[in-house]
Image: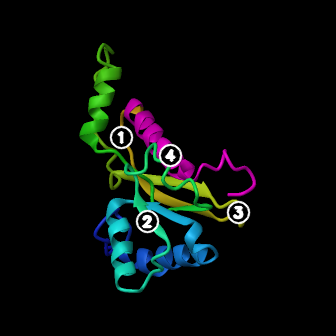
C-alpha cells in the first residue's frame, strides 16, 4: 500500500523525494521568475516549507482554480505545473446533465473499477522519457470527454498565466 500525501493523491515519498526537489532545481535557475501551480494541498505544503526555510520564498506558489483568468503572473518567466487538476464528480455530473439533458441514453456515472483511475500518459520533450499520472475514468465516454476537457483546459490556463504567447521566445 502506498503512503499518500495529505492531498492530490501523490504518494508522500514521491512528493518529498522527487517532485519538490525537481521543482526546487528547476526554479533555482530563476526563482524570482518562477510560479508553481499545483493542487491546493500541495500549494499549502510548499508554503509550509517556505515558512520553515526549506523552500525558496522568492518562488510564487498557487493552485488550480485560483489562477483562472488572472494576469498576476504575467511578469514571470516560467511556470512549473505539479499534478493534473480534476473536477468534483457532482460538478461534472451537473454540467453533463445540462449538455445531455434530452439524450435518450442516461448518463452512467459508474467509475472504472481498477482503482477508479487510469494512467494519463505524457512525454518529456527534452529527454523523451515517458511518465504517467493516474486520472479518474468513468464507464460513460461522455463523462470522460468532459473530464478530459476540464483537465486539459485547467492545465492550459495554468501554463498561460505567464502569458507566453505575448512574449514569444522569452518564456
How far across and how far down the image is residue 76, in percent? 58, 60
Residue at numbered disc 4 = 157
Whether the residues at callouts 2 and 3 have beta carbons within 8 Å, the answer is no
The front one of 150 and 160 is 160
- Which quadrant of the figure has residue 68? top left
* Contact flag, marks 3 and 4 (Cβ < 8 Å): no
Of the numbered discs in the image, which one, if any, rests on residue 99? none
Q: Position of residue 3 (x, y in %)?
A: 31, 75
Residue with the mark numbered 1: 138
As drawn, is 159 to the left or to the right of 166? left
How crowded pointer 1 is (Cα within 10 Å; few <14, some 14-19, many 20+) is rated as: some
Q: Calculate the distance from the C-alpha at mark 4 to the C-alpha at mark 1.
A: 24 Å
- State the image quarter where residue 63 is shown: bottom left
User: Which badge, 3 or 4, comes first in the chain's sequence?
Assistant: 3
* Looking at the image, residue 71 lies above or below residue 21: above
Magenta residue span: 142-171
Residue 117 can be seen, yes or no: yes
Circles 4 and 1, Cβ within 8 Å, touching? The answer is no
Q: Residue at x 53, y 77 (%)?
A: 24
Label 2: how many residues lie within 10 Å, few (<14), some (14-19) or many (20+)? Answer: many
Q: Earlier in the sequence, mark 4 or mark 1?
A: 1
Magenta stretch secondary structure, dominant: helix
Q: Secondary structure at mark 1?
A: loop
- Disc 2 versus disc 3: nearer the observer: 2
Residue, x 28% and y 42% (percent of image)? Answer: 89
Sort mark 3 into few (<14), some (14-19) or many (20+) by Cα contacts within 10 Å: few
Residue 31 coordinates in the image, percent (x, y) = 56, 74
- Label 3's element? loop
Q: Are marks 3 and 1 in contact (CB under 8 Å)?
A: no
- Quadrant holding the N terminus: bottom left
Residue hosting label 3: 128
Q: Position of residue 126 (x, y in %)?
A: 72, 64
Amino acid at each position: 500500500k502506498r503512503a499518500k500525501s495529505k492531498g492530490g493523491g501523490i504518494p508522500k515519498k514521491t512528493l518529498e523525494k522527487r517532485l519538490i526537489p525537481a521543482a526546487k532545481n528547476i526554479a533555482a535557475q530563476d526563482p524570482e521568475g518562477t510560479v508553481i501551480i499545483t493542487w491546493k494541498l500541495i500549494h499549502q505544503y510548499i508554503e509550509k516549507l517556505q515558512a520553515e526555510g526549506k523552500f525558496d520564498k522568492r518562488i510564487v506558489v498557487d493552485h488550480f482554480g485560483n489562477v483562472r483568468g488572472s494576469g498576476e503572473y504575467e511578469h514571470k518567466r516560467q511556470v512549473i505545473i505539479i499534478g493534473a487538476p480534476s473536477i468534483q464528480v457532482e460538478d461534472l455530473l451537473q454540467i453533463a446533465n445540462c449538455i445531455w439533458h434530452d439524450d435518450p441514453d442516461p448518463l452512467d456515472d459508474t467509475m472504472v473499477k481498477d482503482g477508479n483511475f487510469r494512467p494519463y500518459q505524457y512525454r518529456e520533450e527534452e529527454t523523451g522519457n515517458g511518465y504517467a499520472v493516474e486520472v479518474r475514468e468513468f464507464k460513460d465516454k461522455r463523462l470522460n470527454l468532459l473530464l478530459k476537457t476540464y483537465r486539459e483546459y485547467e492545465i492550459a490556463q495554468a501554463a498561460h498565466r505567464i502569458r507566453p504567447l505575448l512574449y514569444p521566445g522569452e518564456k
